[in-house]
Amino acid sequence: MNNRIFNFNAGPAVLPLEVLQEAQAELLNFQNTGMSIMEISHRSKPYEAVHNQAIADIKELMKLGDDYEVLFIQGGASMQFDMIPMNFLTAGKIGNYVVSGSFAKKALKEGKLFGATHIAASSEESNFTYIPKQEDIKLSDNAAYLHICYNNTIFGTEWKYVPETNGVPLIADMSSDMLSRPVDFSKFSMIYAGAQKNLGPSGVCLVVIRKSMIENLPENIAAMLRYDTYAKNNSLYNTPPAFGIYMLGKVVRWIKNNGGLEVMAKRNAEKAAIIYDAIDNSNGFYRGHAQKESRSFMNATFRLPTEELEKQFITEATEKGLGGLKGHRSVGGLRASIYNAMPKAGCQALADFMVEFQRKNS
Ligand SMILES: *Cc1c(COP(=O)(O)O)cnc(C)c1O
């Protein structure tokens, strides 16, 4: 069907086919405006309806009330690594970080530019094969926040619990597992996600933040880098990434129409099990990077016996329409990113290929 492959890219990543088809159908003439969504004013009624519907649907899926703001910000998840300390790391406070992977480490590095930081826990000594346990997390005094990365895209580990912080605001980078499963989002003071993994195209970062977090922000932060600018203006202070928000809105609606987060979680667990079973049943031919109890349902990382075999695997898989499987250089090997939009058939096709490849090459 229309030559689409099973796309295992880590990000930008696969989008639901229905969403792409809807966007295609509307591309030349959005809701009888005679224009595409990219060509109309962000102050127009048709655009505002798209924007506000996306916000309402996100809040509904996250089961959050009016004490939270949903914001759309540019600059990707990476800009949040800067905005978080700029806005919250005030004098005398300490930014706390769990270092569980590359992006968590980048967030810490940026935090250091703005104030004092503290590593509350780390799994770096094992090349990030696991998520630290609650009892390993040691918060500093005067903690401004605890920052965690909920799904470590590069290493393939995912938090299975929400850490207890005893009142310290909890901030999570959920770029690669946002809306993939139910989470008690009300335990978080802020959640953010670059859209291009699980929510839409690149260009927009979703930020969901408790209103009390942004009531008294320092005066000396530039308008575009302060959360209250976005909150006060419904993320329309300047021209927003309108096409990205439109697509994100469609993806969120697709999640809702397909049964919401409970159904996503069930499907994602089944999909991940297909691949992890293929790894676990291979008598060591495939070796998972992540420890079993920390395995991500979004990014499965694994190695083969040799780098030559890994190269050959990627070449032959690509020929069979299984794309984007090359792992990140810091882990090596392979990575199958199986976000919400990856169908179960894609995971099955990969698992079948893995069995066949092992049979031929061991
Ligand atoms: C991809 C990713 C980022 C970086 O996102 P950008 O939008 O490219 O800045 C940050 N955190 C996590 C967990 C990611 O997967």
Image (cartoon, rainbow, N blue to C red):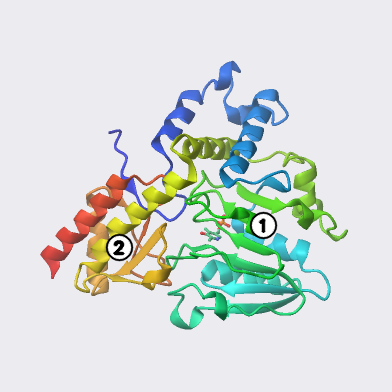
Question: Where is the N terminus found, in terms of image quarters?
Answer: top left
**x, y (%) of residue 258?**
43, 37
- Residue 196 is left or right of residue 230, and the answer is left
Q: Is residue 340 visible?
A: no
Residue labelled with disc 1: 190
Give me the residue at 71% from left, 62% from top.
84
**Disc 1 to disc 2, C-alpha distance:** 31 Å
Give me the residue at 37% from left, 54% from top.
269
**x, y (%) of residue 307?**
27, 72
Determine the secondary structure under disc 1.
strand
Question: Where is the C terminus found, in terms of image quarters?
Answer: bottom left
Q: Determine crowd level at label 2: few under 14, some 14-19, many 20+ residues with C-alpha closer than 10 A.
A: many
Q: Determine crowd level at label 1: few under 14, some 14-19, many 20+ residues with C-alpha closer than 10 A.
A: many
Q: Which quadrant does ligand 1 occupy?
A: bottom right
**x, y (%) of residue 128?**
46, 75
Q: Is residue 169 visible?
A: yes
Residue labelled with disc 2: 276
Decide which of tag 1 and tag 2 comes sooner along the chain: 1
Q: Is residue 86 above or below residue 181?
A: below
Q: Which mark is residue 252?
A: none
Determine the secondary structure under disc 2.
helix
- Type of the residue with mark 2: Tyr
